[in-house]
Amino acid sequence: MSGSIKLSRPTTTLSLNVPLTSSKSESNRALLLNELGGGNSELKNLSSARDTDTMTKLLAAEAYTLDVLDAGTVMRFMTAYLAVGKKERRITGTPRMCKRPIKLLVDALNDLGAEITYENEEGFPPLLFKPFTTQKTSQLTIPGNISSQYISALLMIAPTLPKGLTITLEGEIYSRPYIEMTLNLMKHFGVSGKFEGSQITVASQDYQSNSYTIESDWSGASYWYSLFALADDAQIKLQGLRSISNQGDHAIASIMEGLGVQSTFDNETVTLSKTEIKQKLVIDFKSCPDLAQTVMACAAALGVDLEMSGLESLRIKESDRTAAMATELSKIGAKLEEHADGLWILTSPKKLDVTEVIEFDTYDDHRMAMALAPLAMKFDCIIHEPEVVVKSYPEYWEHLEMAGVIIE
Ligand SMILES: O=C(O)C1=C[C@@H](OP(=O)(O)O)[C@@H](O)[C@H](O)C1
Ligand SMILES: C=C(OP(=O)(O)O)C(=O)O
């Protein structure tokens, strides 16, 4: 599948018991923790995401250069792993990955005693690594409001350091559930850490083998919430999701109540049903940045206005996501604008007035494609470069077709 696809709403009920792929965030952590613990753990239900395939391959690779493609977690987690390794290595990624900042993590690792240098521009991949020799400190300070992936990366290698590690987080903590996911998974693999106030302490200790079953991906589930919200008639069940989850993106269940979707949990299956739609929602995406595009697209098509905060990190992800959403949603008459103090307002058309097929660009960003596709429940649309979804949810288009969406 390449070029473009045209999506049209099903001729009957949108209906599927959705076999979601599992979380790439959990998978990529479990893979690294297993490797650090000797590689004997049984990891069940690993994600089919390309990012997880990349993580698996790079952990096993012997080559000097490792290419993470567009996988942020792989870049950040492997950077910490290679920094405390015994070999000279080089890590690189796609042109966009080489524009996603990494200086805070590199500075922290170099303070620890690593020898990482930049091949080209300071602060950005490609990175060059020398073998790790001596731990210079066990105390690090790092801003908590840029990317939690830097913090997760440092935490996962912390117990392997002879002196352990205490990290002090400065400022507000963004994407906090991802830090907690890291600590919870570390605990599952036998390592305890303490997160109190703005400090996280992990003593030097050994990882233990343990089997782990990865949960379905709540970020991937969010697109089904949106499809359900926008469809006149739908029967959707989502498989493999837990009511108590390691993933902060399970917040989609409560956010979507405002967009007319209710969730019923039963034995790792979530059944969606309709409820009343609110006219305006106030949402802070600080803990769940990957849900922002889904919610914006869905609200725009439902005529719901949004007042949003916590969107700062969207600029440094696979695309500049706030700019990309502003451009794409303007095609259906919605306005996304930045105001003072980090506030973003989405003003949605009160009555959708779309008479032609709308063409959506996807900016090399899986979440642009997946978040915009549910709008096909309201009007025919064309999605350019649909293959971007392989990053986290390769079966997305196949699942939409199975649910009845017409794809040409
Ligand atoms: O640790 C993780 O698995 C992730 C953390 C988040 O990134 P930031 O911490 O950079 O916001 C999230 O957006 C990303 O998709 C996955
Ligand atoms: C931001 C994302 O991923 P990463 O940072 O791992 O590339 C994402 O999946 O939305």
Image: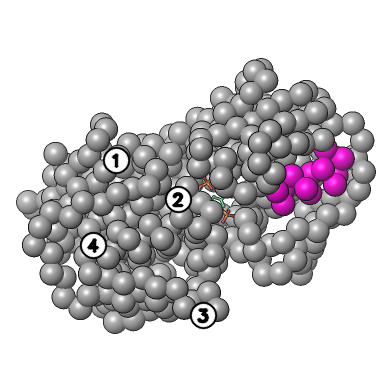
Q: Quadrant of residue 29?
A: top right
Real-space Cα distance between discs 3 and 1? 35 Å
Q: Is residue 378 above or below residue 259?
A: above
Residue at the outermost top position: 62
| Residue 289 on image: x %, y % | 50, 60
Magenta residues (range)? 103-114
Q: Residue at x 66, y 41 (%)?
A: 121
Q: Residue at x 31, y 72 (%)?
A: 335
| Residue 167 on image: x %, y % | 80, 56
Q: Please identify the dominant SS of the magenta region.
A: helix
The question of residue 395 being in magenta is answered with no
Residue type at the position of mark 2? Ser
Real-space Cα distance between discs 3 and 2? 22 Å
Identify the secondary structure beneath mark 4.
Answer: loop
Q: Residue at x 29, y 55 (%)?
A: 372
Disc with the residue nearer the chain's start (2 vs 4) = 2
**Is ligand 2 closer than 8 angstroms to the Cβ of mark 2?**
no
* Whether residue 241 can be seen here: no
